[in-house]
Image (spheres, rainbow, N blue to C red):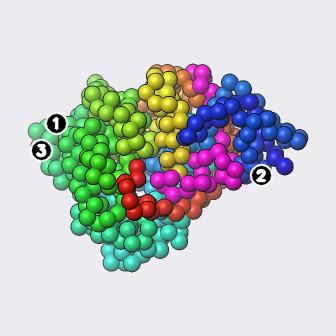
Amino acid sequence: MSDLIFAGGTVVTAEGSFPADVAVSGETIEAVGVDLPRDGAEVVDCSGARVMPGFIDGHTHMDMPFGGTMTADDWDTGTAAALAGGTTMLVDFSLQDVDGTLGEAVETWQGKAEKARIDYGLHVAITNLTEEVKQELPSLPDLGVATVKIFMAYKGTPLYTADEDLFEAMQIARECGLLVLVHAENGDAIAKLQEQALARGDTEPRWHGLTRPEAVEAEATNRAIRLAEIAGCPLLVVHVSCAPALQAIEQAHARGQTVYGETCGQYFVFSDADLARPGFEGAKYVCSPPLRDPSNRPALWHGLQAGDLQIFGSDHCSFNYAGQKDLGADDFTLIPNGLPGVEERPYVLWTHGVREGRITENLFVAALSTNQARVHGMAGRKGTLAPGADADVVVWDPDLTITATQANRHSNVDYTPYEGMTFTGGPAAVYVRGELAYRDGEVIAEPGSGRYVHRTFAQPAPGPAVR
Ligand SMILES: [Zn+2]
């Protein structure tokens, strides 16, 4: 017998859209079908709305140290913001301490995540591939970790990883069933360009973008892909921001190599012109890879349409303008990298993707939810409205219109880069495992109600490339 029925809406999955009810029993979906029996269940009237699987954001940074400071959002405020966009699960990055183990990183982040209002998984970012860490990698799947991240950028910080370690990590990952994620930018070239810019006295925020040209991303993307080809492992290139980097992925697909690609909302609504805003305003738009010339956008849309880019993340990494971004007031290299966006991610994709006719609502669900679950290792349980899956449900109002201001955002940041931007389409109500978590602008789920999700990377079968 069901407890809850989402009735009278249009069910939208990655495969298709159709009028149906969705029945929930306890924490799981019991049935999807026409005119399901009510039997005293609580009925949620979804007429005029789309009923979708809860969105998953495979790329966030909550309560994370960076550049001598901590992100503004912790797991309480960050997951409140996520819910306000319809996101019911995050996969966040636990960071290996340079002298620490991977297990310690997972434990530290599980402690931080005790305040989560939604379900979550954890990637592990490898910062120091010691002999001990090489021995430890095969134990990650037992901890429910399916993914490891390697940074090719940020030379001069512990995040930076040289090719020999990246390559060896790929070989080990292949053996123990982990998916490797890369931040692909050429850290050596960036460090040199930054040094030369500062020596010339070029210290303003716009130099952040000018010292990270598209080619440094394209080069590193291609290099990571070729190293993965040699190691024989699949790869996920995160935050693909420009056409030349996407081209490297398209070429890999043409060769038959399994490479997944993520792009992010900020690259579709902001540009290098925002980095060049007068005064120090550009610091509000500093993230890496940097915001690009808008001429890249048609290629990124095509990447999503063609399946060369499968997932749409936020890379939510928030820092206050006052007291954090201004650490770089005299030197752009000291501006903490990152933008808030976990709340806006679905609004951006619906407004500019679905409403403007670039993608279908089914691709919207695939990029925000179903493909996220598949790539990040929780397919079947998350990212679908099928019987037996967790009852994470978004009741989406395609006509809901909101203009973003710092005051109506749910994250804990003193500005929003989306200030004054109007979106149409948003969540009317959000349920996490059958519990009402958000409704009409109000976050209802309590901190601590989220649960850790044990993920398993599904190694693609030998044969044609999997996208
Ligand atoms: Zn990131």
Which of the two labelled residues, at mark 2 and mark 1, occupies the earlier sequence position? 2
Q: 85 and 167: which one is in front? A: 167
Assess whether residue 277 is covered by the magenta stretch.
no
Q: Position of residue 270 (x, y in %)?
A: 36, 29
Q: Which mark is residue 196?
A: 3
Residue wearing tag 2: 26
Q: Residue at x 24, y 37 (%)?
A: 209
Q: Is label 2 in contact with label 1 (beta carbons under 8 Å)? A: no
Check disc 3 and report its element: helix, strand or loop.
helix
Q: CA distance from mark 3 to mark 1?
A: 9 Å
Q: Position of residue 418 (x, y in %)?
A: 44, 28
Q: Position of residue 314 (x, y in %)?
A: 45, 41
Q: Nearer the viewer, mark 2 or mark 3?
A: 2
Q: 430 and 51: which one is in front? A: 51
Whether 143 is drawn above or below 113: the answer is: below
Residue wearing tag 1: 202
Prevailing SS of the magenta stretch:
loop
Q: What is the three-letter code of the residue carrying label 3?
A: Gln
Q: Position of residue 224 (x, y in %)?
A: 27, 56
Regarding residue 402, the answer to whether it shows in the image is no
Q: Residue at x 51, y 53 (%)?
A: 374
Q: Residue at x 28, y 61 (%)?
A: 229
